[in-house]
Image: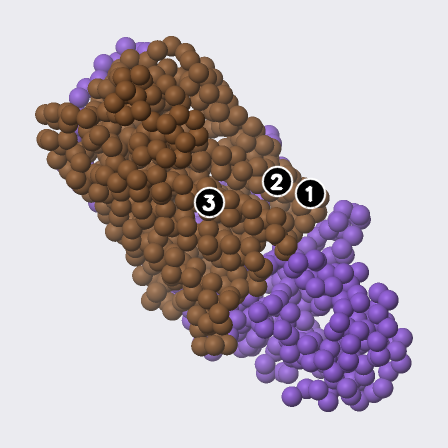
Chain colours: A brown, B purple
Amino acid sequence: MDAHATPAASVRHGPPTGPMRWLTTTNHKDIGTLYLWFAATMFLIGGLMAMLIRAELFQPGLQIVQPELFNQLTTLHGLIMIFGVIMPAFTGFANWQVPLMIGAPDMAFPRMNNWSFWLLPVAGGLLVGSMLLPGGGVAGGWTMYPPLFLQGGISYDLTIFAIHIMGASSIMGAINIATTILNMRAPGMTLMRMPLFVWTWLITAYLLIAVMPVLAGAVTMLLTDRNFGTHFFSAAGGGDPVMFQHIFWFFGHPEVYILILPAFGIISTVIPTFSRKPLFGYASMVYATASIAILSFMVWAHHMFTVGMPAAAQLFFMYATLLIAVPTGVKVFNWVATMWQGSISFETAMLFAIAFVCLFTIGGFSGLVLAMAPVDIQLHDTYYVVAHFHYVLVTGALFSIFAGIYYWLPKWTGHRVDETWGRWHFWLSAISVNLLFFPMHFLGLAGMPRRIPDYALQFADFNRIASIGGFVFGASQILLLIVILKCIRGGEKAPARAWEGAEGLEWTVASPAPYHTFVQPPEVK
Amino acid sequence: MPRPRAIGAFIAAWLSLSAPLVRADWRLNLPAPKSEMAARIYDIHTLILLVCLAIFVVVFGAMFYALFRHRKSAGHAARHFHENTSVEVIWTVIPFLILIGMAWPATKAVLDQKDTANPDLTVKVTGYQWKWEYDYLQDGVKFMSVLATPREQIENKAAKGKNYLLEVDEPLVVPVGKKVRILLTSNDVIHAWWVQELGVKQDAIPGFIRDTWFRADEIGTYRGQCAELCGKDHGFMPIVVEVKSEADYQAWLAGRKARLALAAADADKVFGVDELKARGEKIYAANCAACHQADGKGLPGVFPGLAGSRVATGPAAAHIDLVLRGKDGTAMAAYKDQLNDADLAAVLTYERTAWGNAADAVQPAHVKARRD
């Protein structure tokens, strides 16, 4: 994407050319681009793993991968998609868009920004590369529960280091984003005038700063249990394996919202644009986001209803979890109210946003079912849970990323998106993703456990449908790559305001956005 | 008012008739409950599903109405309202009230699920990688329960049976209509004991004892699986519960006790090497082959091979100790409480003489001498 290195910009602050430009860059746009391409690369790797998983599960019996490798694939697929795809992609959006949306010239700490990106390929390399070591890659599940996680080989230690590095990267990124938002807004942009995407990222940044150290602590205890004879998680030495789960999910549940709050921000930007109407209930959206973030610290043990907690704890976590449905519901209602009486058009970005609202809500409903502790006893660790979190993370987080890419590509590249290819990508993805994940609800209800490489005959038909859906969904993503590459290489020139209904400071600068923007702060009235 | 379960069954039946893809044997819902608790869970699930469906229809009915009627291409002009406090309050309060309505039956179910007092029968269940042990504490009967599906079926070399991956050599046997308390623990990593039709799932945590309970309504065979990732063969450690009439249960118990007495007599016998090898091969297949493999070669880098290994061809005492006590920090379990002296002697002899190994045989008395 050399397009935005316009000659005028290079005269004042010429970036090096070639690879050194990307290695040494402190420009928020360059770093945003790096984050997004890193996420795309990891999406390809994690996606190929998912294809192998679905191929093995296409029919009963062991055909393509043996159980050891299968467990590595599910574990790494989870870690890669969470830490290597969704989180970096959102950070990429934040890097590109937050300064543009608040009228800041760059991020608050440009050099740290460079460092926090370049840590990621190192961590990703450790994680993926560990598969080649003797004993194979990490196979204890992305949740890393001990004592199983204490049994593995050297790749388990490398995974712990990878998580440490990714955590450091996330914390630096979060500090950078929070500082930028709090200190570098253009004059006149009060907190309650910030675009909602900026709000959701501010809250996400605080969640990251709060919980990534908790994860780092948990995996450090695993590391010392594995190598230095501590017994944090071993009953034989006075420890408790369940304590890991408490610590892990105290990180893990806010993490779920780290993966979805920026998505809410993107959707709250896209829907008003294509409804040609301001977002309904801006203030209530901000309060709902903050409530979700606060409640997310109080619900962690709903991931642990089967470990045998006392009744009082089961009930507390059940009630707290149900409570999260209230602010989440408010968000969905507000999106629908934004569309109501609008002047709606269906560009690809909007199609993904509409699909997000619908399908994310299905994930929310299955979450409600799982929140009921007695029902969770039947569904915990089944494919119902797999269906639930893939609806939330694929048709939720990932679809919002697609919506955001289609929405901001004109600003990033200076060219309009090829809507025909985009629609094909949307419809193929939207249909196949449901073919892939909806039958998993039935599989879970019928009793298929998750993380198994082979299954009883009664599960065969729905697994075959899910696999076919999976292959189509995987292949459809090639279309996205084509759309992006076409958009970078050329196409109809996009004006500064690329969409008729687009509001916000980013649409006041040229498309593509010049290498340096808002050197003089804009006026926000 | 029709019972929620009837409504759920109606929806499932309607779905299965309406879609041509859906055949009658494609299960869309929880299995038919065979215990009171499973029935209550089924009803709560149906209730929530219906509430969710209703909300979905209302909210997305409105959204798709707007998408259709308020289109730009239909010439609709946007109206620029963007705030309404009373609407916000209404759609905060109504969901809250619905949630309270849903939480009420669930609360009662949680309290009853946790009430493990006054059982008729208590069984201690221990998870191992990758099998279950059942210990009838009141009757002194204890045995292992291992996957019975032949390897050839898993590797697609033979046709798969009806209960593929859901069959074991020795099921848990319990009397019908009795409150059975399950004490759960694990010997190695976390497992989860789960039988869906009985409405029971509980994690087995090494070093701790957790409990749960069920009361089966009907005589029959109920099948479940380990529900917590526990390593390589997590998908291959099913659970089978056979619910029998009280008389049949007592007869089964008596047969079990007789088998125990026979096994105890073995401990003092001296066996021939071939006899030990033949017996040991079966025990090896059930307990050791998952890691060390049937050909004794192990999995390089993960599980050590036994063919030609230092331990299996070295002094018997060290070999016996390793199998009795396991090895800390690895997946090698301690077998001193899992197998009796005769079985241990048999499997040790097999390991020391199979795959070209040529070490001396082990007798039950040798094993006995190295306990404690």
Which residue is tagged 2?
A52
Q: Amino acid at mark 2?
A: Leu
Above or below residue B208? Residue A77 is above
The tag earlier along the polypeptide, 3 or 2, is 2
| Relative depth, front residue between B63 and A68 | A68
| Relative depth, front residue between B18 and B259 | B259
Q: Which numbered mark, 3 or 1, is in the foreground of this view?
A: 3
Tell which subunit mark 2 falls on: A
Which residue is tagged 3?
A122
Q: Residue at x 38, y 10 (%)?
A: A492
Above or below residue B319? Residue A201 is above
- Are the residues under marks 2 and 1 on the same chain? yes
Q: Which mark is residue A64?
A: 1
Q: Amino acid at mark 1?
A: Ile
Alpha-carbon span between mark 3 and mark 2? 25 Å
Identify the element where label 2 is drawn. Answer: helix
Q: Which numbered mark, 3 or 2, is in the foreground of this view?
A: 3
Report if the CB atoms under discs 2 and 1 are less than 8 Å apart: yes
Considering the image in quadrants, where does the N terminus of chain A appear?
Answer: top left
Q: Residue at x 59, y 63 (%)?
A: B218
Alpha-carbon span between mark 2 and mark 1? 8 Å
Above or below residue A92? Residue B269 is below
Q: Amino acid at mark 3?
A: Val
Q: Percent from the top left, x then y, of residue B240?
A: 64, 63
